[in-house]
């Protein structure tokens, strides 16, 4: 006999058998693309003399750009996978679901990328 997923028996299993709609896929793609763009822009700014102010990411710059990029990508992809796993779980017993977090995360990431683009004008 094969394994059986008992869907609906526990709130943490909610949504485990669902497909993701086009809006959610677009949000995920936007987050990943913004994160990759952020990593690229950060590395380019570092090459032009800027410094990384995030101490965690500054630590991962010292081994090299590949390590920096890999950590940056992992720190984006892992939470996305976590949110997708528990996307239909309600936050703190409210009507808001975990999947509602993802679109909100686009804002600070987009602002970060916008700031980095602005910095290109001031860093030679």
Image (cartoon, rainbow, N blue to C red):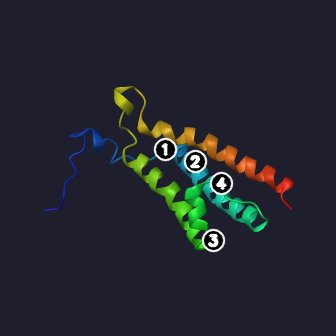
Cα–Cα gap, marks 3 and 2: 27 Å
Alpha-carbon span between mark 3 and mark 1 = 34 Å
65 vs 37, nearest the viewer: 65
- Locate residue 17, reporting x and y percent: 33, 48
Badge 3 or badge 2: first in the primary sequence = 2
Tell me the distance, in whole angstroms, between the alpha carbons under discs 4 and 3: 16 Å
Relative placement, left or right, of 95 versus 33 is: left
Mark 3 neighbour class, 10 Å CA radius: few under 14, some 14 to 19, many 20 or more: some
Labels 4, 3: front one: 4
Q: Nearer the viewer, mark 1 or mark 4?
A: 4
In the drawing, what numbered circle is on residue 21? 1
Q: Earlier in the sequence, mark 1 or mark 2?
A: 1
Query: Is residue 33 depicted above or below 101 in this figure?
Result: below
Task: Name the residue rendered at 36%, 30% in the picture.
Answer: 92
Q: Label 1 vs label 4: CA separation?
A: 36 Å
**Numbered disc in front, either 1 or 2:** 2
Secondary structure beneath label 4: loop
Q: Residues within 10 Å of mark 1 (few under 14, many from 20)?
A: few
Return the residue at label 3. Answer: 65
User: Which residue is more in the foreground, 63 or 86?
Assistant: 63
- Residue visible at 34% across and 43% down in the picture: 15
Q: Determine the residue positioned at 46% across, 51% down.
A: 79
Residue at image mark 4: 53
Residue hosting label 2: 26
């Amino acid at each position: 006999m094969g394994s059986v997923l008992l869907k609906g028996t526990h709130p943490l299993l909610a949504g485990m058998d669902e497909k993701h709609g086009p809006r959610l896929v677009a949000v995920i793609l936007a987050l990943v693309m913004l994160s990759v763009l952020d990593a690229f822009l950060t590395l380019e700014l570092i090459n032009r003399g800027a410094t990384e102010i995030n101490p965690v990411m500054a630590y991962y710059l010292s081994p090299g750009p590949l390590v920096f990029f890999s950590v940056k990508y992992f720190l984006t992809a892992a939470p996305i996978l976590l949110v997708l796993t528990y996307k239909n779980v309600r936050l703190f017993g409210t009507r808001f679901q975990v999947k509602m977090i993802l679109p909100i995360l686009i804002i600070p990431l987009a602002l970060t990328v916008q700031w980095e683009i602005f910095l290109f004008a001031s860093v030679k």
